[in-house]
Image (cartoon, grey):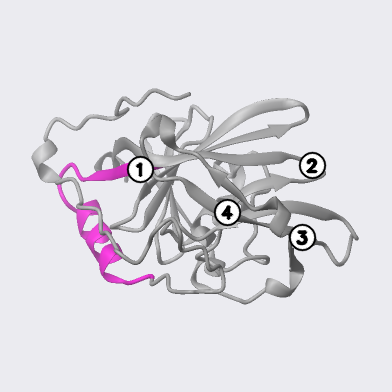
Amino acid sequence: MKSLKILVICSCLTACQNPQQEKNSQDKASNIQLQSDSLIIGNSPYDTVKSLQNAPNPIAYFDKALTFQYEKNSIKNELWFYVNETTQQILYVPEDDMIQAVISYPNGTYIIYATDENGRKIRINQYIDVVLSNGDFSKLLTALPENNTTISQKNIQQADIKTLGYILHYQKSNESEMLNITNQIPINSYQLYGFSKLDGDAKLPLNFDYTNVVKKNQLITHIDGAYFNLQLLNYGPNPYEVNIGEYQ
């Protein structure tokens, strides 16, 4: 399990205040109606991000983490995403010495914060347009009520996460996967799946792309597939900061 320490500390913390988490009293553990599509992706948080990027020593702050465990080729690893629900940013840190961070923004932009061969800190922009879409692909899924499950989060003193079980049938290959899905985590899951669509070393080490399967308010928590298995361990407080002002 990764350390809870903040990896990047800016010498001027007053330049960016910690965002206040927005709470919705209607978003409770008992609300597991996956047919709803109430996630709203606004423009104002991204405008704030743009202004922060142009400010002296801007800090990208993430107060929560999604922690997955996956098994591929008989090897187990963890996959971490850091989340700021207020700005709607999601951070992924690849296991690559040249890439310090990859941040997904709610307008479909992914910025790779990296160091080039000359030691310069640079930004590389990629755009994943599917982040802004939201098709209804429910016909690909068949409900499996016997596979409904609850993820206990007592270890981090957070509310349990309820999930619904499904089987996914791939029409072209005749293969299938067992999935569990939740809508209790208030993010655009397409931003998460978009990390699998990136080019180069910023891409995820497994094909965690379900933009053609679920809606953007539906997060995959478990996958039992032919090529890898995955399960969500926790979603809760885990602060992380990165100084994006150093990158040109």
Distance, label 4 to label 3, CA atoms, is 15 Å
- The answer to which quarter of the image holds residue 23 is bottom left
Distance, label 3 to label 1, CA atoms, is 29 Å
Label whose residue precedes the other's in the sequence (1 or 4): 1
- What amino acid does circle 3 point to? Leu
Q: Between tags 1 and 4, which lies in front?
A: 4
Q: Does 13 sit left or right of 43 as displayed?
A: left
- What amino acid does circle 2 point to? Tyr
- 27 to 199, vertically: above or below: below
Q: Is disc 2 placed on a helix, strand or loop?
A: loop
Label whose residue precedes the other's in the sequence (2 or 1): 1
Determine which residue is flagged by label 3. 168
Q: Which mark is residue 163?
A: 4
Q: Between tags 3 and 2, which lies in front?
A: 3
Residue drawn at 13 percent across, 37 percent down: 13
Distance, label 3 to label 2, CA atoms, is 14 Å
Distance, label 4 to label 2, CA atoms, is 22 Å
Q: Is disc 4 placed on a helix, strand or loop?
A: strand
Which residue is more in the foreground, 2 or 201? 2
Residue drawn at 49 percent across, 27 percent down: 97
Task: Give the magenta-colored segment's residue range.
Answer: 41-66
Classify 10 Å Cα crowding around label 3: few (below 14), some (14-19), many (20 and above).
Answer: many
- What amino acid does circle 1 point to? Lys
Classify 10 Å Cα crowding around label 4: few (below 14), some (14-19), many (20 and above).
Answer: many
Label whose residue precedes the other's in the sequence (4 or 3): 4
Q: Does 26 sit left or right of 166 as displayed?
A: left
Q: Is disc 3 placed on a helix, strand or loop?
A: strand
Question: Could you say where residue 175 lies in the image, as x and y percent from the top left?
Answer: 87, 56
Label whose residue precedes the other's in the sequence (3 or 2): 3
Determine which residue is flagged by label 1. 64
Q: Which mark is residue 227?
A: 2
